[in-house]
Image (tube, helix red, strand yellow):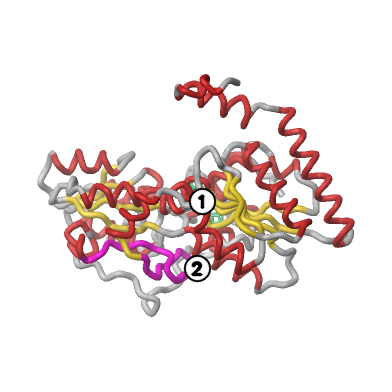
Amino acid sequence: MKAEDLDSSWGYINYIEKIFRRDRDLARRIIDMIRSLSDRIRKDYGEDHRIKIMNFCGTHEWSIVRYGLRSLVPGNIELVAGPGCPVCVTPSYYIEKAIELSLQGTRVYTYGDVFRLRTLRPVEKSYSLEEAKALGADVRVVSSFTDAIIDASRQRRDSVFLAVGFETIAPGYSRLMISEKIPENLSILSLVKLTPPAMFYSLEILQEKPTEPPIAGVIAPGHVSTIVGAKAWTPVAENFEIPVVVAGFEPIDVLAAIAEILRRYVRREYGVYIEYERALSWHGDLGAQSAIYKTFKASDDAWRGIGFIPYSGLRIRREYKMYDALERHSIEDLKPEKWSYDLPKACRCAEVVLGKAKPIDCPLFMRACTPEKPYGPCMVSMEGACAIWARYSFQSR
Ligand code: SF4
Ligand code: SF4
């Protein structure tokens, strides 16, 4: 493919399709490389030596399952899903508060997956915003914050947007707050979570079980890293002395990231490496980072079923409190002493998110919990590991 072919968006899509999804020769060569590195690991560490590679991001897990990548890696390498779904880890408490607001007449804007997310406790008989809407609450499903702004500008009702996501979505809110483009009747309930602290926490938890195969490396999320930069993963690489490869989302990207991790593991090297060069840089988007810093502050935040992780969430700074739904609606923010375990009985979502269990280890998987009728949070969103395994594979190792 010639460079000029990439000038149009169609050219770029075509390039991704040809190289990163359909180039069988390239895939075969990378898989051969993975196999020979796996042989080398057996030789160096012993026949029984097994290792794990953890991916953070729900979309990486999607690619691994959708394209059957687990079946392509040798048996001594296990691919483990990590915390990469913001819907899965949003505490029940905030959804309960949103239901309360919606039942009291505030218009609540939400994405479709959060709309179906079930709470632990019912609020006036509603376990989700979907159920509250059925009881007459004012809940609107939107596909972007801009949709909420447009709708809120056309009416006078007090309105709240549920901002569930990772760092990727924060700059959009920041820029709109800074440019004062948000109507007075609309505020943001910031439930934005930060990814490197969560990865750090997961690895610490996994290290506590020394009998398990070690995590030999991490595939770090590409989208998030376009904002925070590959550098954000340095503490993870250095503290755990493992390679962290920031990767794109196509099957070739994921295979290349696995090969790179194995190469570094064999050489006993650690650090942060960029596979996703076509989209991100070491420093990330400095403009976006400064907008985030201006409008948000990092705070200790609760992760559903897990508890508080230090500096893992974003809350709106006091200077922008007119946009903060916590302030506007006098919602008490969750504190460690008030947090209690918030997963439904028998749901193993927290272990799935921390890489300690696979979706198929849960006795409810595809029995009491299905994508059509999700019981636990990891079955709701397309980035949730349980939903991905349910849709594409029961056989994943
Ligand atoms: S926002 Fe993007 S990078 Fe982050 S978890 Fe979702 S798909 Fe992955
Ligand atoms: S299958 Fe359902 S109940 Fe089980 S861990 Fe996943 S989300 Fe929870």
> Viewer-nearest of labels 1 and 2?
1
Find disc 1 in the rendering and name its residue.
282
Q: Is residue 283 left or right of residue 104?
A: right
Q: Position of residue 122 (x, y in %)?
A: 34, 62
| Disc 2: which residue | 306
- Which residue occupies the foreground of this view, 171 or 129? 171
Is 269 in the magenta?
Answer: no
Residue range highlighted in magenta: 298-318
Location of the N terminus (image quadrant): top right
Return the residue nearer the eye: 170 or 241.
241
> Hey, what amino acid is under mark 1?
Trp
Q: Judging from the image, what secondary structure is the residue with disc 1 in?
A: loop
How far across and how far down the image is residue 309, in percent? 46, 70
Residue 315 magenta-drawn? yes
User: Are dots 1 and 2 in contact, CB under 8 Å?
Assistant: no
Looking at the picture, how far across and down is residue 158, in whole percent?
Answer: 15, 52
